[in-house]
Amino acid sequence: MTSPTPKPEAPPKLKDNTTTTSFQTRTLSVPPGPLGTWKDNTLQTWLPPPSPPSALVTATTHLLTSPIPVAFPTETVYGLGADATNASSVRGIYLAKGRPSDNPLIIHISDLDMLSSLLAPAPIPEIYLPLIEKFWPGPLTILLPLPSPSPLAAEVTAGLGTFGVRMPDSELARSLIKMAGRPLAAPSANASTRPSPTTAGHVLEDLRGRVEVIVDGGVCEVGVESTVVSGLGGERVVLRPGGVSLEELRAIPGWEGTVRGYGDGVLGAGEQPRAPGMKYKHYSPRARVVLFEHGGKVEAFGEGETVGLIRAGGWEAGCGMGVVFEREVEGDGEILVKEGRLGERRVLDVGLGGDVKGVAHGLFAALRELDRLGADVIYVEGVDDKGEDIAAAVMNRLRKAASEIRA
Ligand code: TXA
Ligand code: MG
């Protein structure tokens, strides 16, 4: 491994037109295998492996000694992590991502011991206990009252009186958090507005030169971010749809009446979202995304030299347009692209299968892959989100990524 010394190269331009030093970015792989265990088989105390892989040791050192965030995998998407108790480390996240600082970050904990240290002397609110029991570790973020004083850096919560927290279902992530001995603030490890990363390669694409360490733990299982819920002040509300569905939430005692508290549009000026992150255009590749609501069909390829297709079970390959397929390209994140021609037009076709969990798993990777292969426009087949399943998260992300939505 080479040294982590900053490299004096062309500094990347940030959104606000300031520049930052460019770093040498290293991707450190963690070999597959068990990465820790629960003490007593409860969520109370997580024990990292006695001899952790060197990637985790290096990442821990960075988290504790450098204000530059570290990218690491979770079961949902890759996160860009920093010590949530250290203000300059947290500022490093906003800087690396080019993320507006009025958007609060999710805190990641290794175990309930760590959660207690963030709430003390208050206990975990009762209403959350059945959710924790059922969905942690996993893709569910809960909002908790911020104690005063709080060990969390003010930059984490962007001035709100609550903080969002989750326990990831990734042994790697929990061990990294525990080894650092600090809660990690971690948004998705993409550049602001880009699709969230589900592989270390995606992170590198966006953040090369902006971070020093990317921990590579393979492809993320869920593929969309966690569900954000609030049960505070008598409300039961989903603020962001994600890996845990409304149907699963409503099956929990006390949560039967859970309502949707989000919209899928990009909000206009003056409109106030409950989860501040929901107001920005998000999840977008460079290509123009045209989303077809469930049941909609592509009638013609109207524009662009290179047309990308993302199919979700209803459309046939090439949308039945007579595309002549010539080769298959294996992309990052378990994405298989069939490339072909229709007259002068190049067509790039990805089938994500008919199972909505599979669609969620591959969606961001497919958008990125078609971008990388040069699609000018991407036609996406929407899924049926009238029910209460993870389709809500898929369509939420797609509506935000889309430049145009067709019926
Ligand atoms: O799956 C995930 O949640 C990923 C992985 C890395 O764990 N993390 C993630 O974090 O998506 P981020 O920071 O990109 O998304 C945080 C979302 C935003 O929509 C934000 O506005 C909302 O959660 N949020 C965080 N804290 C909040 C709070 N106190 N009140 C309301 N919304 C909050
Ligand atoms: Mg994000």
Image (spheres, helix red, strand yellow):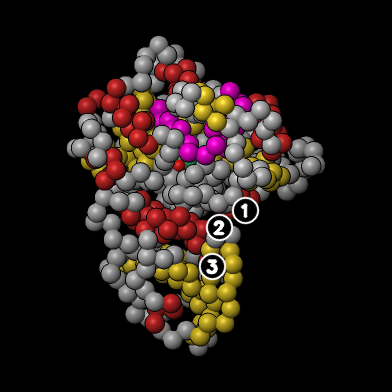
Q: Is residue 109 left or right of residue 395?
A: right
Residue 72 shows up from this direction? yes
Q: Which image quarter holds the C terminus? A: bottom left
* x then y, percent, for residue 144: 36, 25
- Residue bounds of the magenta highlight: 163-181
Distance from Cα at disc 2 to Cα at disc 1: 9 Å
Residue carrying label 1: 201
* x then y, percent, for residue 24: 73, 44
**Magenta-drawn stretch contains 369:** no
Q: Is mark 1 within 8 Å of ligand 1?
A: no
Q: Which image quarter holds the N terminus? A: top right
Disc 3 residue type? Answer: Leu
Q: Residue at x 29, y 71 (%)?
A: 296
Distance from Cα at disc 1 to Cα at disc 3: 16 Å
Q: Nearer the viewer, mark 1 or mark 3?
A: 3
Residue carrying label 2: 333
Element assignment for label 3: strand
Element assignment for label 2: loop
Disc 2 residue type? Answer: Gly
Please report contact status of discs 2 and 3: CB closer than 8 Å, yes or no. no
Q: Vertically, is 33 above or below 307?
A: above
Residue lying farthest to the top in this orientation: 121
Residue carrying label 3: 336
Q: Residue at x 26, y 50 (%)?
A: 388
Element assignment for label 1: helix
